[in-house]
Amino acid sequence: MDWIFEPWPWYISGPLITLVMTLLLLMEKQFGMSSNLRTLCAICGAGERTSFFKFDWKAQRWNLIVVLGVMIGGYIGANFLTKKSAVIVDDDVASSLNELGFKSVNQSYLPEELFPIDVVADFKIVLLLIIGGLLVGFGTRYAGGCTSGHAISGLSNLQLPSLIAVIGFFIGGLTMVHFIFPIIF
């Protein structure tokens, strides 16, 4: 039973994702987390102010169950299926991160150097988080969906815009990790 506490390998998690996507395709539904925020805004009455939120949100209620499942699954995974709270990374990666000043590598889930609790007391950091959130929201809207929607659902439906969006996500992520991140730290 020790296997349940380890990350699942691709040959288990991949077919499970495929099963879920097949069921969604058969039910003519599309998966994506950002659409849940749109649904929640529409439920709260945002459609009275902006036409983007004027749609039949009741047809999207099923997707809110996905959000609930993600929260419940995350809670179960973090509290019952995890032996320790640290993510173990490769020794070479740990060495590189230690050289950049990350001393909490392999000791905590979130690096203390990036996520200390006192950041919420610093106005500059809170402002940067708000700006970052607005940019992510803009990017999600501009791309017509989030990373999970495009990478999982859009690619499963063989949609060219999703392929272009996923390529853009990867280019942005690689640029951040290899060029911008070293400048910041």
Image (cartoon, rainbow, N blue to C red):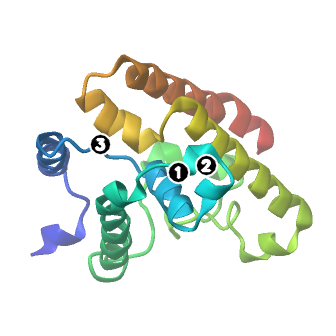
Regarding mark 1 in the picture, which secondary structure is present there? helix
* Tag 1 residue: 94
How far apart are the alpha carbons under marks 2 and 1?
A: 5 Å
How far apart are the alpha carbons under marks 1 and 3?
A: 38 Å
Q: Are marks 3 and 2 in contact (CB under 8 Å)?
A: no
Res 179 quadrant in image: top right
Residue at 60 percent of width and 32 percent of height: 142
* Tag 2 residue: 97
**Compared with residue 148, is residue 72 higher up or lower down, i.e. above or below?**
below
Point out the frontmost of discs 3 and 2.
3
- Three-letter code, disc 1: Ala
Q: Are marks 1 and 3 in contact (CB under 8 Å)?
A: no
- Nearer to us in this view, 77 or 51: 51
The percent coordinates of residue 40 (x first, y second) are: 50, 63
Q: How many residues crowd mark 2 within 10 Å: few (<14), some (14–19), many (20+)?
A: some
The percent coordinates of residue 117 (x first, y second) are: 72, 76
The residue lying furthest to the front in this view is 48
The residue lying furthest to the right in this view is 123
Q: How many residues crowd mark 1 within 10 Å: few (<14), some (14–19), many (20+)?
A: some
Residue at 38 percent of width and 76 percent of height: 84
Q: Are marks 2 and 1 in contact (CB under 8 Å)?
A: yes
- Three-letter code, disc 3: Gln
Residue at 63 percent of width and 30 percent of height: 178
Residue at 77 percent of width and 56 percent of height: 130
* Tag 3 residue: 30
- Three-letter code, disc 2: Leu
The percent coordinates of residue 109 (x first, y second) are: 50, 67
